[in-house]
Amino acid sequence: MAKPDKPDKTEYQKQLEIYTLGRFQVKFGEQTFFNDNTRSHKMSDLFMYLITQQGKQTSSETILEALWPDQEYSNPRNVLKNMVYRLKKTMLDYQVPDAKSFIVYSYGGYSWNSQSTYWLDTEAFETLCRKARSLSRSDPHQAVDLYREALSLYRGPYLPECHYSDWVLPKRHYFRQLFVRSVSELLALQKEHRLFSQMAEDCEKVLYVDDIEENIHLYYIEALLQENKTNQARAHYEYITSLLYQELGAKPSQAMRRIYRAIKAQSEKPDLDFNDLQELLKERDDEEGALICEPDFFRYLCRLERRRAEREDLPVHLGILSLTGPNFQPLPEARLKDYMKEMEIVILSKLRKGDVISSWNDNQYTIMLPRVSLEQAEAVMQRIQNAVQQNCLDEEMILRSSIHPVLTWE
């Protein structure tokens, strides 16, 4: 039957090895099953399906429909019977002991025989995670070792070759969730027992496989800080926050902001960073509206939007609003400040979530309008200009506006 631990050298030639995490592979000794021809491809599909349905008897019709729904068979039972025969013969050709025992036929259906002798990475992965969790309080250092061994088996999603197959999704989701939970439990133990060098090493391995979970990035940055690798921690923070903004339009979470403050406190460099810019954002009661930020952060966002515009061919426009007197004469500073504040309220009422506004200087606002055409951007600016002129300004004040594509902005 399946064994939870990887076969040692004395068993290596005696046991079938099945790998499903990150890549499907079946080995016996130094030999690897299947190749790229069509017949072998169908046998590997069948093998993957039966392994996934472990212990569950499935009819020939159901198996064929799941694996090759676009094909029709006049005699599906005979088709699958021949395919199972070829699969068993392949294992016999590789001299796998008891090759005929791996696939069982009974009551009109086929199933994988979990009582046969083989090693399966998912079973070993589950067993190691379960043992580690049970020892996390009584023997935390042994638990850490078991978690690390378990996580070395997770090399990517379950059966990635079957990316679009519905029958593989439940197990793929289950093993990824087990992976994420086990990683978090391992890193928490390493943090508790101050194993920071090991913690950073494991984070790097995990992030190579799956970089989606924010808490793993947080653990990694904390481990780097504990190892006095402040520059590396800062670089990773900038990488992940910029990536999240570019890919998802997401700002750093509260947890990310806290870890940045730790970086900043430990760093001797006062240079401006993504989080510095985020901290300069002015909070507004209406979170659904446009984003207000300082000029430096506005410039930073424009760079990111310009890259996105180049990559995805999306229109982004910049608007400039300038408040002056007749003939471009400057306005008195005391009055200008009040009028600019009133203008800001009106401008915000005309913008949507995703737009960005900044008070560029004493008499100018800049506005970034993502994903709008030139005609739409001009219409937005005209509405703003009309509303401001009507509701905020005296007759001697003039508000001028202009529009520029972000790809031309430096």
Image (cartoon, rainbow, N blue to C red):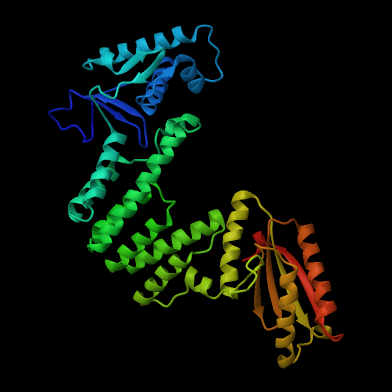
Q: In percent of the image, x 29 and y 45: which residue is there?
A: 151
Quadrant of the rendered structure where residue 158 is? top left
Percent of width and height locating residue 166:
50, 31
Q: Is residue 347 above or below residue 332?
A: above
For residue 377, say whether it is visible.
Answer: yes
Query: Is 348 left or right of 292, judged from the image as shown?
Result: right
Quadrant of the rendered structure where residue 255 is? bottom left
Percent of width and height locating residue 81:
40, 9
Q: In percent of the image, x 84 and y 72: which residue is there?
A: 386
Q: In percent of the image, x 42 and y 14: which residue is there?
A: 39
Where is the N terminus found, in terms of image quarters? top left
For residue 320, say whether it is visible.
Answer: no
Q: Is residue 267 above or below residue 163?
A: below
Percent of width and height locating residue 147:
26, 48
Q: Is residue 335 above or below residue 139?
A: below
Residue at the far left: name it: 10
Report the number of discs. Answer: 0
Residue at the far front: name it: 107
Query: Is 273 left or right of 22, judged from the image as shown?
Result: right
Query: Is 8 left or right of 340, judged from the image as shown?
Result: left
Q: In percent of the image, x 72 and y 57: which residue is there?
A: 372
Percent of width and height locating residue 390:
85, 77
Is 41 or 67 nearer to us in this picture? 67
Where is the C terminus found, in terms of image quarters? bottom right
Is 33 or 134 nearer to us in this picture? 134
Is 139 or 299 nearer to us in this picture? 139
